[in-house]
Structures are given as C-alpha cells and as structure tokens.
Amino acid sequence: MSQLVIVESPAKAKTIQKYLGSGFEVVASMGHIRDLPKSKLGVDLENDFAPLYQEMKGKEEIIRELKKRAKKSERVWLATDPDREGEAISWHLAQLLDMDLTEDNRVEFTEITKSGVQNGMANPHKIDLDLVNAQQARRILDRIVGYQLSPFLWKKIRRGLSAGRVQSVAVRLVVDREEEIRAFTAKEYWTIDAKLTAPSSRKLFAARLMEVAGKKAELADQAEADAILKKLENAPFTVKSVKKRVTSRQPAPPFITSTLQQEASRRMGFNSRRTMKAAQELYEGVELPSLGAVGLITYMRTDSLRISDEAKAAAAEYILQAYGKQYLPASPRNFKSKRNAQDAHEAIRPSMPNLTPDQVKSSLTPDQYKLYKLIWERFIASQMANAQHDTVSADIMAEDCLFRASGYRVKFDGFTKLYEEAKDTASEEENKELPPLEEGSVLKVKSLEGNQHFTQPPSRYTEATLIKALEENGIGRPSTYAPTISTILSRMYVEREGKQLRPTSLGEVTTQLMKEHFKRIVDSKFTAAMEQDLDDVERGEKDWVESLRVFYRDFAATLSQAEVAMDGKRMRVPDEETSEVCELCGKPMVVKLGRFGKFLACSGFPECRNTKKIVLATQGLCPKCGSRIIQKKTKTGRNFYGCSGYPNCEFMTWNVPVEERCPKCGSTLFRKGGKAGKFLCEKPECGYERPL
C-alpha cells in the first residue's frame, strides 16, 4: 500500500510526487473543500458562533475520490500550504476523512525542492488548532460583517453592495486621500539657483540659496525673489567651507509579501493579484529541462525577514564566484522583522540561489520570469556589500546669502551593481560629482535665476502605496492584500486612473455612511486591533470565541442604532454629468454605475430609458485599418487600447497612443512605459522606435 499526500494544487502535487517517488501518491484537493453556506449566515450567533460548514458545490467528485484513496492508503499526510488558510484546509480534510487530530499527520513544505520536501516529511506534527481557530475567527468575523451589514447598505444606498472589515478600511483610505486632495490649496514659493564654475574647471555645477542673513530662505513671491537677485548683482560668490565624507548605503532586505507586491507594481506595473498568481506558480513548481519539476521560490505569503543559514551560504558562494570577494560583506546579513511579524516562514527568496534568471528563462512564462528575476536579484543583492559614495557639500557665500552645492562620486558600487529598490514617487535627480573646490576661492557666476514653484497636494494611492499603507497601519495580513484590492475594484468603490486609485461616487457615498454610523468598522486602529486579536488567537494567547463575543456585542448594538437613525432614509449616489446629449429626447446624458461598470444613461429617466456604452476615444488611429483607437478596460480594471472597428479589426495593445505621428511611416506612435520606456510604431512593417 502507498501513502497518500494531499496538497492544494495539481502543479504542487506533480512537483512533490517527483521527490517522494513510487511509495507515495500525491493528490490535490483543489483548495478548500468545505466552507460556510453562500445562501445564509451559516453562524449560530446564540451558540458560541458555531459555524455551519458544508461541502462546497462542485467539489463532490473530488471529495469522493479523496475518501476512496484515503481508505486504500497505508497512511494519509496533509501537506496544504504552511499558513492559517492551509492549516484550516488540512483541518477540514481531517474532519471529512475521519482522521485522528492527535496524530502527527500534518507536514509543511516551505519550499518545493528535494531538501524542502524531505525536511517536511521528516518533521510531521499535529494540526495546529490555534492556527485553525484564528482562521475560523477571521472567516466568521468577515461573514458577520458581510452578511449583516451588506443588507443594510442595500436598503440605504443600492442593492448588491458589500461591506467587509478590511475592504471598507481600504476604501476609506482612498476616499480620505481624495478629500485631502480636494481640500488642498496650493501655495506659491520661489527658489534661487545659481550655475557656477570653479577657477580650476569649466564644468558647470548648481547651488541653491539656503539662508539669508543667517535665517532659512523662504521666498513667498516674485517680489521677494527679485529683491534677492537685485542684491546679488555683481556680488562675488566665495567658497566658505567644503565638507567631504564617505557615505554607505545598505541593500534593501529580501522580499516579504507586501514589499514584493509593491515592487512588482512599481517596476513592472503588475497588480497584486497578477503578482501573487506568478509567485504561486513559482513556489509550486515549474518544469526545467535539467532538473524536472522544481519550486523556484520559498513560500510567498510571509511577513518575516528571516533567512536560513544555508541560503545565506549559497548566496555568498554565488556572489564570490560572480563578483569577487570585495562584494561580500564582512559577515552574512541579518534583517530584523517588524514587531508583529508571524515569523513562521523565511522571507521570499529563490529556493536555489545559484539558479540565475537567465538559466531558467526559457522554461518560464514572461510573468514568471520577470517575477523570479526580481526575487532573485533582490535576495542576492541583500547579501552583498554596501555601496559607498564620496560625497561633497560646499557652502558658498554671496553678500549675506548662503548657497549650498552638493554632489557625490560612486566610490564602490557594492549591491547596486545588481539591484536598486524602486521608489513610489519620482525624486529630483541627485547631484553628480562637483569639480574640485577650495575654501576662499572665488567662483564665476554663469547664471542666477529665481524659479517659481507651487506646493503639491498629496498623491493618490497606487496599488503599491495602498498596500504599504495597509501594512503600516496593521490592516490585513500578507494573504489579504491582493484579494482586498481586487474586491474594492470589482465592486466599483475604487477605480484605476492610470496607476492611481481614485474613489468612485459609490465609494464616497458608502464611506460617508460607514463613517457616520459604523465608525469602528472603518477605523484603521480598530481594524488593526482586531488583527492583533487574531494573532493572539494564533499564538494560543486568546480564546477565539471570546474575541468574537466582544466584537459582536458592539457590532450588533451599532447596527441596531443605525437602523433606527436611518429609518425611512436613503443616500443617493450622485450621477456624473457629461456634455453628451441624448439623441432620443435631447436631455443631457449622465454617467451611472451598473453591475458591469459605468455606462451612459439619459437624465430624463424614467420617461426616457436610453442607455449606451461609454466610449473613450483617443488621438490615435489604428495601424491596421486606420479607424479610431478607443480605450477599454479588462475585467480587473486594467486599461488597454483597441480598434473601434472591432470585431472586423482585432488590433489591441497595452501601450498608450499619443498625438505624435511616426516620422518613418506617418502612423500613430505609442508610448510603452516601464524601466526601458520608449515610443514605438506598431505598424508591423515599420519597426520605428526611440527612447522616452
């Protein structure tokens, strides 16, 4: 008789089967096999929140097959993912298969490699009921909020709305940021910048006014700037002091779930769901010509920065061979995880650090390759030596005005030879190397200008910055970021505008109601405290039923008060006015939100029921047939561009059409973003392109 190993996905099963051999049979449960019913609450509020679990629809055949194979097997091992969700799936499987919960029948694979699988099988343990209870508490909390609060929103705003502990806070963050932007008043300010040369060099360098008469230079308008400029006419610019030092830059730590999603968004434009899909595939295993099926990265749902000694040693060996001894730090690096990190798994890293992206590229999909390259480079760079810069800062006096110039020279590139972390916002380019400057030397002024500026409002969230905000506020956990953002987009509380996230009118009205009547549900501190409670349950420090009892007592009272306060009242979602006129009755058309997104409707409804799709025409013409190119959206809200002549012409592209025409053939040019951004012509026979 063989031993049965149950995992969650077929890809993972295939990879693990290779390592375990003929004495084992590895099968997939295809994720969860039991859950709360969809048609009702499924939680007994009067009996300690006892959940009513049911076998999931569509899983009947899988369950029958699992039971059949379990009966024939010598032993059953539960090898679902090593996290709360995976522990719960193992528990449900154990219940269905009548397994003994006191036996060591749970195994975990933090990486799907030969050693990872062997280590997992060599260290079985009992199902961790604290983890299971933490997952049950989260599921029941979300069910209570969703199934009791959502009907209230249906009555007061619109049918089909949903509320959730984490999603409602995420929407509030986006709405609050939009309100900040609207309330922002730009303030004018001026700077004065000099372009100078040193006696020993013709090279221009820049210096900015920092102080006037010993006080910080704060110029409110042009008149103040002009007064300084007039005072400095023909004034000598003399070097007061020169400070030189060597600065060190440390590499970023290896990825955790949130930072992986942020960096993939910043660098490659991946949404969080796309990132996690590719990461799951890399973890579960891909077929390599030389190695067969192998998992290329460690488990991708983690908030720990811990790295095993074996992985550090493998990284050091690769760095030594590829770059030389000078690129290795004096001792292996350790990174400190944040205070509330679970630390159940390592950081996300390549399972075999010596397996470079180029070696596996031919076996991976484009998304898998891009993500593996990102993970591999970040991890290897995290174990490399610091970068070092020779920095120079010079104070320059003209009358009673102090100007400052700064620059740097790369002394040793260190980890930056391989990888540098991307930034959320574009910053001014750092000053380059200054010419040799000596104290007391008089500089030649090539130009002296006043420049007008205006303070800028806070930026809208992107997926990357929203995930960062959720993490910093302790809202959600590694496994929740991607589904949370997908939910608020699909429910049309938030929409994408390029890379930015902005609230819809529906999102704003719903958040307004929630803030007025359910303050705690949309309060980030309260939600973070609930997450901490779940963590305490996971560690066995809190009773999960008592946590639910405390939450529900307040929630039920709040819901009852809201029902009374809003008795007979409804909140209206305002329509977005347009300049388009209804061709049937002549009244203005307005933008409305429906089940499938935005559409145009006549403002004369219900007398006039005219509706039509929203078509966003662009400046571009189709390179295939010459028709107008229009902007469209995928089901996940991502913009793409297609021919208005569809389905007769099937041209589509992710690149943005611009007004400029191709200098070679006269066709529309498209802007391709990303690290290697460029303008290009998409006419197949042309091939023109140039850098942005």
Image: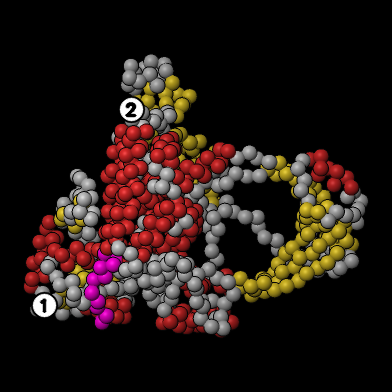
Which span is picked out in magenta?
122-132
Taking the image as shown, residue 141 lies to the left or right of residue 322, namely left
Upstream in sequence: badge 1 or badge 2: 1
Between residues 174 and 643, which one lies in front from this camera angle? 174
Is the image coloured rainbow, by chain, by secondary structure, or in one colour?
A: secondary structure
Q: Residue at x 7, y 73 (%)?
A: 72
Q: Residue at x 15, y 55 (%)?
A: 55
- Identified by mark 1, the residue type is Glu
Q: What element carries label 1?
A: loop
| Residue holding disc 2 | 568
Crowdedness of circle 1 by 10 Å Cα count: few (<14), some, many (20+)? few
Q: Which residue is drawn at 23% across and 50% down?
A: 45
Q: Where is residue 69 in the image (x, y as percent from the top left)?
A: 10, 69
Taking the image as shown, residue 75 lies to the left or right of residue 580, namely left
Q: Is mark 2 on a helix, strand or loop?
A: loop
Between residues 181 and 428, which one lies in front from this camera angle? 181
Q: Position of residue 541 (x, y in %)?
A: 34, 67
Q: In which quarter of the image is residue 478?
A: bottom left
Q: Which residue is drawn at 41% across and 53% down?
A: 527
Q: Is residue 472 visible?
A: yes
- Identified by mark 2, the residue type is Gly
Between residues 520 and 31, which one lies in front from this camera angle? 520
Between residues 256 and 386, which one lies in front from this camera angle? 256
> In the picture shown, does residue 491 fall above or below 11?
above
Residue 74 numbered mark, or none: 1
Q: Can residue 464 be seen in this view?
A: no
